[in-house]
Amino acid sequence: MKKTMGSFAVILLCCAGISTVSGQSNETLDLLLSEQEATLGNTSYLVLVAANIASEDWTAQRSVDELISRDWGFDDAQPDDVVNLGTLAFMVMKSFDIKGGIMYAILPSRRYAAREFAFRKFVPGNASPYRILSGTDVANILGRALTSLGEAEGTAQ
């Protein structure tokens, strides 16, 4: 019960982190939460909307096209690709321009982005960059990252 309530609270924080959640965002979040293996289309949509890169009326395909256009190493990406921790961490770090540790600064990659997320305590449990994430995992991790970014912005003022 505690785990379920904790997950629910983090999901709510994730939603709060997305500036104004519209019907499209809610539908995409519902789709993502139902996924046993999170898809890149729904994940990228939520990350890019949260980072104010995407518009809330974008589709999953449009969000993936945006990833491809940004030269972040998503050249062959498809909306139905499965998301692992390294992919999520790298996408969030790039989208929010998060500076990582020394290894990420030298070699920005999915591996070192996942390590940075583990260091920042965004990832509960297994922090392998190859860990396949469920939709709930994505929402939890994104919620933790958004909460941390909000706290950092609050202290920077």
Image (cartoon, rainbow, N blue to C red):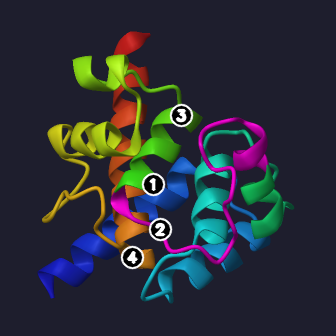
Q: Is residue 66 left or right of residue 101?
A: right
Compute the Cα span from label 4 to label 3: 21 Å
**Label drawn at residue 94:** 3
Query: Label 4: how many residues lie within 10 Å, few (<14), some (14-19) or many (20+)?
Result: many
Q: Is residue 80 magenta?
A: yes
Q: Is residue 67 above or below residue 84?
A: above
Disc 4 element: helix
For the residues bearing labels 2 and 1, Cβ distance under 8 angstroms = yes
Q: In this rendering, which labeled residue sits more in front, label 2 or label 4?
A: 2
**Label drawn at residue 87:** 1
Disc 2 element: loop
Q: Is residue 133 left or right of residue 2?
A: right
The location of residue 84, given as percent across then percent down, is 39, 65
12 and 98: which one is in front? 98
Residue drawn at 64 percent across, 78 percent down: 80
User: Quick one: quadrant of the N terminus?
Assistant: bottom left
Mark positioned earlier in the residue sequence (3 or 1): 1
Mark positioned earlier in the residue sequence (4 or 1): 1
Residue drawn at 40 percent across, 37 percent down: 109
**Label drawn at residue 83:** 2
Query: Label 3: how many residues lie within 10 Å, few (<14), some (14-19) or many (20+)?
Result: some
Q: Which residue is mark 4?
A: 136
Amino acid type of the residue that numbered disc 4 sits on in the rendered structure: Thr
Region rendered in magenta = 66-85
The location of residue 72, given as percent across then percent down, is 61, 38
Q: Is residue 156 magenta?
A: no
Q: In this rendering, which labeled residue sits more in front, label 4 or label 1?
A: 1
Q: In this view of the protein, can residue 101 be seen by the observer?
A: no
User: Quick one: quadrant of the C terminus?
Assistant: top left
Compute the Cα span from label 2 to label 4: 12 Å
Query: Label 1: how many residues lie within 10 Å, few (<14), some (14-19) or many (20+)?
Result: many
